[in-house]
Amino acid sequence: MKTILVTGGVGYIGSHTVVALQENGYKVVILDNLCNSKAITLSNIQKISSQAPIFYQGDIRDRPMLRDIFKNHPIDGVIHFAGLKAVGESQSEPLKYYDNNVVGSITLLEEMIKAKVDTFVFSSSATVYGEPGATQYQEGMPTTPINVYGRTKLMVEEILRDGAKANPGLRVACLRYFNPVGAHLSGLIGENPVGTPNNLMPYIGQIALGILPKLKVFGSDYPTPDGTGLRDYIHVHDLAQGHLLALQYLEDHPGALTVNLGTGKPYSVLEMISAFEKVSGKSIPYDLVERRSGDLAEYYANSDLAKTVLGWEAKHGIERMCEDTWRFYRQLDSAQS
Ligand code: NAD
Ligand code: UD1
């Protein structure tokens, strides 16, 4: 049985990946400081997969803790989710982001190499592409991220690719996620941000529950069919499967792989609202307002490489994304009332 260290494993994408790993025969050790997640997720992971991951509450920048983990467990590979991800906050507190995301990743990588662990899967983002003037992003395209968060992701990618060049035994995969949405079929784990959500789906979910009154649709004059922004929403379950396939791929392929994980099919904000209304039976009131600064009209993935090298393809469509999000929000609501 292989043992995987999952940093940030209590978070949104991490928790779904931990479930997928445990269901596929991996043993999991989680390192998470709970700065953006709650310990209750650990018992929900256990409920879903009838197995408790080993949990260390701590920071990826804590070298002694990393040394303990690598000493105490026969770690075969690392999946690195731990990171800060709020674009606005990254602009106002850049050093916090460079320290957490970049210094944190370097510390983890150094301790991993010292412990003679050679496999590293990294959570990157479509944000690294920035504004190349294209709408369909392919891995070879220029990377010019337009915010601090995106730059931290690109820096870590480059550190990993340089690391793999210098250490021929190293195996790294940088997975560039598009817009993760959805939740586990059980309704027990999903995305539940602290405070008012910045992202579309959690915002819609909170309107459906009556927590928030109305959605602001940012921009209705984009050069898109209905004038609202188009994005490549991807179900978190499909994303989790992508991590498993990346781990398997790295077993036979030393070096560095950089790959998009998206569906290749974009949806507009109005299409997302209408799909959510259909599955939930709730009305989602909205106002069309000004564009949000930093938003692009449209982007989506070219996922041919993921299909060719990993044999990965997204299976879940927009309806399932909305159904699972809604189930998670209803469950959350009944647990709180
Ligand atoms: P999340 O905030 O739900 O999960 C991140 C987890 O990492 C949290 O549990 C948090 O407590 C933990 N963490 C943060 N800094 C840490 C540190 N220094 N030490 C230990 N633990 C720490 O976020 P998520 O949506 O699950 O995203 C996971 C990763 O994927 C992040 O690196 C994020 O940047 C990346 N990503 C996310 C998206 C998205 O839309 N959700 C898109 C592209 C990339
Ligand atoms: C954002 C981040 C990106 C991150 C991604 C996934 C920015 C600029 N980018 O992308 O780095 O990887 O989340 O977490 O923040 N929308 C509304 N009203 C809302 C919220 C969103 O109309 O209240 C629209 C947006 O304008 C966009 C679409 O919905 O067209 C999706 O927005 P969002 O979920 O925030 O994701 P992105 O902006 O694509």
Image (spheres, rainbow, N blue to C red):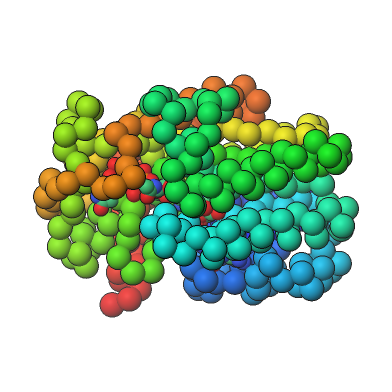
The residue at the point 67 percent across, 51 percent down is 79
Q: Quadrant of the C terminus?
A: bottom left
47 to 254, vertically: above or below = below
Residue 120 appears at what percent x and percent y? 72, 47
The residue at the point 27 percent across, 37 percent down is 229
306 to 72, vertically: above or below = above
Is 230 displayed left or right of 282 in the figure?
A: right
68 to 156, vertically: above or below = below
Hey, which residue is sitting farthest bottom in the picture? 337
The answer to whether residue 289 is visible is yes
Is 83 displayed left or right of 245 in the figure?
A: left
Residue 279 appears at what percent x and percent y? 24, 46
The residue at the point 44 percent across, 43 percent down is 146
Between 317 and 309, the one lying in front of the other is: 309
Residue 222 appears at what percent x and percent y? 21, 32
The residue at the point 13 percent across, 45 percent down is 288
Total labels: the figure holds: 0
Between 289 and 16, the one lying in front of the other is: 289
Residue 46 appears at what percent x and percent y? 58, 66
User: Quadrant location of residue 205?
Assistant: bottom left
Between 40 and 91, the one lying in front of the other is: 91
Is 231 displayed left or right of 282 in the figure?
A: right
Is 155 displayed left or right of 71 in the figure?
A: left
The answer to whether residue 19 is visible is no
User: Quadrant location of residue 167?
Assistant: top right
